[in-house]
Image: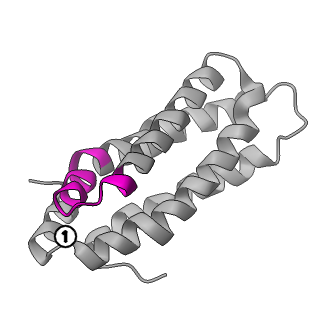
Amino acid sequence: MKRHASLAHLSRDHHCALVLASHACRHQNDQALSDPVLQRFSTDWTQKIHPHFLEEERVLLPCLRRQGEEALCAQTELEHEQLRQLAAQILAGNTRLFPQWGELMRRHVRFEEASLFARAEQVLTSAQLQDVRTGGA
């Protein structure tokens, strides 16, 4: 889906999240994750996915809240928190939660692309979209 240039970097981040989520969902019957799989999860989570959440929460969601989009923002924050909690548990050794994390991440990305970003493109002004693009700088 073609995104407004100001949201394109956030949309591109979703590719990494979806690749990792697909990988997680393929581990449905695994009792333990191999070290390389766990390392990849740790790296992608800490270097790519979690920073993406923080950027959305710091820049995009406040802009949407000012436009009255509280329900979308609340759902985004709830899902971010659920994914954070699952990630913390996985990294602490409860790797059986990896498929659950993957399924939630898939649903979350679909929600953001279809609802959150689509609504942002409809209701945010050019200046607000530029703030999203520049990280609120």
Front residue of this view, candidates 45 and 28: 28
The x and y percentages for residue 48 are 44, 45
Instruction: Choose between 133 and 84: the one closer to the eye.
Output: 84
Q: Does the magenta stretch include residue 71?
A: yes
Q: On the rendered structure, is 85 left or right of 72?
A: right
* Residue topped by disc 1: 129
Q: Is residue 42 left or right of residue 72?
A: right
The residue sitting at 38% across, 48% down in the picture is: 52
Name the secondary structure under disc 1: helix
Looking at this rendering, what residue extends furthest in the bottom direction? 2
Of the pair 20 and 96, the residue shown nearer to us: 96
The residue at 73%/25% (across/down) is 95
| 107 up-or-down from 27: above or below | below
What is the residue that sits farthest to the top in this orientation? Answer: 92
Residue 49 location (% of width, % of height) = 46, 45
Task: Tell me which colouring the rendered structure shows.
Answer: one colour
The crowd level at tag 1 (other Cα within 10 Å; few <14, some 14-19, many 20+) is many
Region of the chain picked out in magenta, as a range: 57-73
Residue 29 is situated, as x and y percent measured from the top left of the image, at: 91, 36
* Residue 112 seen by the camera: yes
Identity of the residue drawn at 51% across and 38% down: 45
SS majority, magenta: helix
Residue 124 shown left or right of residue 72 in the figure: left
**Who's the residue at 20% across and 51% down the image?**
62
Looking at the picture, does residue 57 appear above or below residue 110? above
The picture places residue 27, in percent across and down from the top left corner, at 82, 41
The amino acid on which the numbered mark 1 sits, given as a three-letter code, is Leu
Residue 79: in magenta span: no
Residue extending furthest toward the right: 29
> Is residue 117 found left or right of 82 in the rendered image?
left
5 over 72 or under it: above or below: below
In this rendering, the answer to whether 113 lies above or below 108 is below
